[in-house]
Image (cartoon, rainbow, N blue to C red):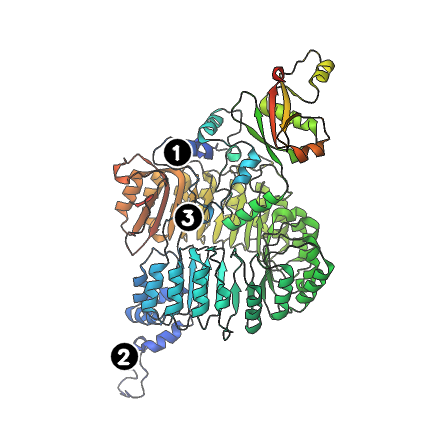
Amino acid sequence: MAECKDSGRSPSSSMDSSTHPVLSTTSSGCRPAARRDDLSTDLQLGLSLSPASSLLVAESKSIPCTPRNRVLPDWPPIKPFLRSALTASARRQRTLFVKVYMEGVPIGRKLDLLLLDGYDSLLAKLRHMFKAFITYADVMEYHQRVPHEKAAHVLTYEDQDGDWMMVGDVPWELFLGSVKKLRIARTDKC
Amino acid sequence: MAPAAPMGRGGSRAAPAAAAPPWHVLPDEVWEHAFSFLPADSDRGAAAAACRSWLRAERRSRRRLAVANCYAASPQDAVDRFPAVRAVEVKGKPHFADFGLVPPAWGAAAAPWVAAAADGWPLLEEISFKRMVVTDDCLEMIAASFRNFQVLRLVSCEGFSTAGLAAIAAGCRNLRELDLQENEIEDCSIHWLSLFPESFTSLVTLNFSCLEGDVNITVLERLVTRCHNLKTLKLNNAIPLDKLANLLRKAPQIVELGTGRFSADYHPDLFSKLEAAFAGCKSLRRLSGAWDAVPEYLPAFYCVCDGLTSLNLSYTTVRGPELIKFISRCKKLQLLWVMDLIEDRGLAVVASSCNKLQELRVFPSAPFDAAEQVSLTERGLVDVSASCPMLESVLYFCRRMTNEALITIAKNRPNFTCFRLCIIEPHTPDYTTHQPLDAGFSAIVESCKGLRRLSVSGLLTDIVFKSIGAHADRLEMLSIAFAGNSDLGLHYILSGCKSLKKLEIRDCPFGDKPLLANAAKLETMRSLWMSTCSLTLGACRQLARKMPRLSVEVMNDPRRRCPLDSLTDESPVETLYVYRTIAGPRFDTPACVQIV
């Protein structure tokens, strides 16, 4: 069976193009920005890949080399009216995106809290995103429960009043109603 | 008038007065009358090529002209050659402009065409522009230049505003059709609808569904009331549901309706009002709209379902059960456009209920979401192809496909004329065997001998192009994306596909060699588009030198101004657009587009 050579794979063909002077990226922008609003694609991924970083992704064979990892603004081939209608209806569906910063890391992440069903899944998601051990609510209580594991980070949030609070004290629904931002702080600073 | 010349028939007997003129010296008027029975432009073109007198008769009597590429000939050429045209259609940007692949300001200005028409075709009645830049000045000129102007159709155009529409409304006394499909129209808050005079009653088609702004509903109601011949009415999102009901009561003769925004909180009163309004529309056959639909209102349509032949639900986000209940009542459907929210089980119901179906389009509801959320697979298409014997046109977005399914579909429906399959994730193989989908698409082209349009997707090697090149004899338009593995793929296509007119390719590993080897083929085609392939500037230069009747356009990144002359032959080319033309190179290219 004929194998698909690398030159046929879209990310690498466009990766090659980024090193040549004449070639453009695939986003040649035809319609005005109001129509081609690709926020939904960025939001879904939660991470905007620059061409350079997706080049690294393509090189490392651990991640499959498909455009799933890269946002293609002009694929699949749907017309602008349908595209903007889908984007508009996606936005109308409820989402609650908050920024998440880890202390010491300048670049933050974004997270849709409505996709989670509680504090445990929030912590699990953040641990996965930041590759760090994060705890919440009562730090002392946690240490009492798991003495041999000392968490380096604790999860805090900024509420509507602008105050920074520790996550976990109020019921989840109440939390959703008041959270504006998340911050993963170092425990020794708390 | 050619004189009758006796040919010496009947031996020695000379009877010049009684002898009929030989056919080849019949007067032009006779030929013109004969040609008026030829249905297709291509037939008229063939007749015109037979001899000089037929050429003269045909071109002088041509009433309808379709210019498929606005740069293939100059407007003046068209006006000079066909002086009696009453209806003209001009298309501009390449098809991939719909998906943002063509740089802004690329071209396709309608102004030169309007100017030439105003000068040479004062009796022009119909204008159709597709993918062109139409300005308010153009619309003003149209309103001022043609005293019997009747039909204006603008599809996927841009560059004009409601001010231009106002000029049309005010100036075109005999307007029958104003059909605005998917245009980008700037809202200048001008109440253009009010500019149709009170004495104006000739409207048959009014489609302003793509207009973003508000519309004076009272004025619209008065217009609809006095235009007794109104058959097609397609509203925009500014018309609320209860006003829709009022409009329907004023125009019960309507045949085609676009509902505009079809959402409101459920009120039993509004429901009854709508239901009653629809019950009055006994002639309603075609239904469409931007339905942020509220499922509770769908039953209001039940009374028209029996008569519906065309249903466009491509903006409907209503889920399975209500949708299926609604569609299953439309037993006479010939055309169905729907979201993938219908899922396989919905399509199974369509297959059993709507066996007059001719055209099916299934659009993706969540194309940017990597996760599979909707259960629409190859199963749906297989069911519909099995049970709908008249199905001939398909556009299907899905996330998985198998060769076996495609082979079955091909066997079920050899009568496909248009088959467009878009598997959303590029390079997706057959999900059961993990093989490329070559076998499946090959079966399609081998079985469907009348196939005119094909779009392929999924994991594909050069093998599928060999089949397409060899078997798709009637294929006129082919779209390829993320497919093939070498130059051979393109070579198979260009050296085969006898009837190919338009070829559009993106993100495929096709290079210079097949392009240059098949340069002559390009002159038999309308156009070729290749973006993000493996072309070099040198090949484009060579092609341009070799084929002077082709226009070879190279498009660069708009952010980088890089004059072509300074680049070497080895420089890669991001986008190539080649088309045949008798007009020579155009002079209206933006900085990022260069004609080689």
Return the mark for residue A17. Answer: 1
The residue tagged 3 is: B503
Where is residue B546 drawn, in percent x and y?
Answer: 27, 46
Discs 3 and 1 carry the same chain letter? no
Corner quadrant of residue B214? bottom right
Please state which of residues B71 and B433 is positioned toward the viewer in this rendering: B71
Q: Earlier in the sequence, mark 3 or mark 2?
A: 2
Label 3 close to label 1 by CB (< 8 Å): no
Chain of the residue that carries numbered disc 3 in the rendered image: B
Q: Nearer the viewer, residue B421 or B97?
A: B97
Left or right: where A159 falls relative to B226: right
Mark closer to the observer (1, 2): 1
Q: Percent from the top left, x then y, of residue B273? A: 69, 64
Q: Name the residue that disc number 2 marks.
A: B2
Q: Please report, as a chain letter, where disc 2 is located.
A: B
Q: CA distance from mark 3 to mark 2?
A: 45 Å
Query: Mark 1 is on which residue type?
Result: Ser
